[in-house]
Image: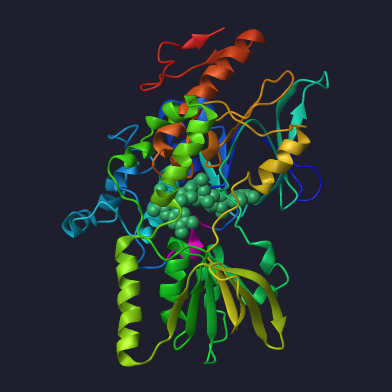
Amino acid sequence: MRVGNSMAWHRDVELLAVGAGPANLALAIALEELAPAEISTNSLLIEQHEKISWQPGMLMPWAQAQVSFLKDLVTLRNPRSRFSFLNYLRSVDRLNEFINLGTFTPYRTEISDYLQWSANSLSKVRVEYGRECAAIGPARGPDGKTHTGWLTRLADGSTIRSRFLAIGVGRDAYVPPVFSALPPERLIHSTEYLTRIGGVPTKPPCNVVVIGGAQSAAEMFYSVQQDLPNCRSTMVMRSIGLNNYDTSKFTNELYYPTFTDEFFDAQPGARKQMLREMHQSNYAGLNPVLLDALYRQIYQERLAGKQRMQIVTMTDVTSARLDGNEVLLELTDRKTGKVGELRCDLVLLGTGFVPRMPGLIRRLGAELGLDEITVTRNYRLVTDGPSTAACYLQGVNESTHGIADSLLSVLAIRAAEITTDILVYRAEIDSQTGQEALIGDIPNGPVAEVFRVR
Ligand SMILES: Cc1cc2nc3c(=O)[nH]c(=O)nc-3n(C[C@H](O)[C@H](O)[C@H](O)COP(=O)(O)OP(=O)(O)OC[C@H]3O[C@@H](n4cnc5c(N)ncnc54)[C@H](O)[C@@H]3O)c2cc1C
């Protein structure tokens, strides 16, 4: 239904998925494979960008994924699916070469291409690009109380009403407050690195400071040598130095989708312990190949007497401001308490993501009057009051669902869990309200025995 001008129009869908990242793409595939057509063909996936790109700011051509290709959008749930990474490789005529490469970890660029290929291969769920979700609020029924759906407003002014909503918008970039006074052109967060570094004036000498001591910071530290030739770069971190990822096969089992139940059922203290002990396996470490390459590069520079890269450890940036044409960073040595200065032209932030819910979800929580944003085991947002609608949150439930929640490892199974929950919930509600709900055949779901519910 069009209301007013061509940009401000309204439509209804059964399910709206916001953000075409891996999480919602896996859900779209699960809907196609597990849900009845009346749901999948009435589902819409919207993406703010004009195409799908996996973590575009850090899509360096040499960077590899840190997860097996078998943890793609579908294989752990349905190894025979046409949406597998192997089928993608076959369709782009690279299967032999990939096998010959002898690796489990594809280049990030090919994962990204696989995601776009998967979206292009959907035949029931629609995908629309250039659709940025600006805000989401609850839609109420005629009684003014029952929560019957979601009203999503897009940046172009149009609105979409849906009974089901899946939010998979990733997490918000973390910019430490100490950098807030710097002009935006002097600061690049890793999420924007590749999209902005090409626009930085390269007049040497260019002094760059990279903040952080984990994978993203290290990748920018490595990459900036080529991207800004002849620059001098300093990496500043709080920790004692760069470290490899913890790659124990034993603790890697905590990334299994089957571990989610155990984590979810664990006591609060145990959950915290697991996240603390797993930190080094995901957030605080580096790929050993990159770590070695960096060490060798710094060693070779020392050997040649042309030191352009340096690492400053155990140091906090305690203030940051523009001084003339330079950025002036105040550094405080954690060992001695001594305060020093570091001048540079550009700051690169490898400071990761805000651990709390993204702004879009927090604003939705406020609209719903929720004190706390929590989800059920099946990722359904917990709301107050009577409701016939449901909203699912993907990739933001690490504190309740475990370390793998924001990663690819659990996507295929989680997508099936959400799809199953939608089908069961829909059937329950429709039976209460007297409507007829058709439940499809769910091969792997716990509700396989449910087909038609009144
Ligand atoms: C550099 C980097 C490397 C990584 N490597 C790995 C790895 O090797 N293995 C692994 O398992 N995990 C890795 N991760 C973790 C990563 O979070 C997951 O792989 C995965 O991208 C999470 O998928 P997602 O769909 O939840 O979120 P995202 O991938 O962040 O996708 C969110 C999507 O939503 C869109 N969006 C955001 N806001 C809106 C809006 N308002 N309206 C419309 N669309 C919107 C975005 O444009 C994006 O397309 C990496 C993360 C980073 C930053």
Is 166 included in the stretch rendered in magenta?
Answer: no
Q: Which residue is drawn at 60% across and 75% down?
A: 338
Q: Residue 431: where, in percent of width, then height? A: 61, 9
Q: Residue 441: where, in percent of width, then height? A: 41, 19
Q: How is the image coloured?
A: rainbow
- The range drawn in magenta is 51-59
Q: As drawn, is 442 to the left or to the right of 249? A: right
Q: Residue at x 42, y 17 (%)?
A: 446
Residue 123 seen from this side: no
- Magenta highlight: main SS: loop
Q: As drawn, is 2 to the left or to the right of 59? A: right
Residue 96 image-quadrant placement: bottom left
Residue in front for this viewpoint, 421 or 50 = 421
The N terminus sits in image quarter: top right
Q: Residue 126: where, in percent of width, then height? A: 53, 41
Q: Residue at x 60, y 70 (%)?
A: 337
Residue in front for this viewpoint, 269 or 349 = 269
- Residue 124 in the image: above or below residue 229: above
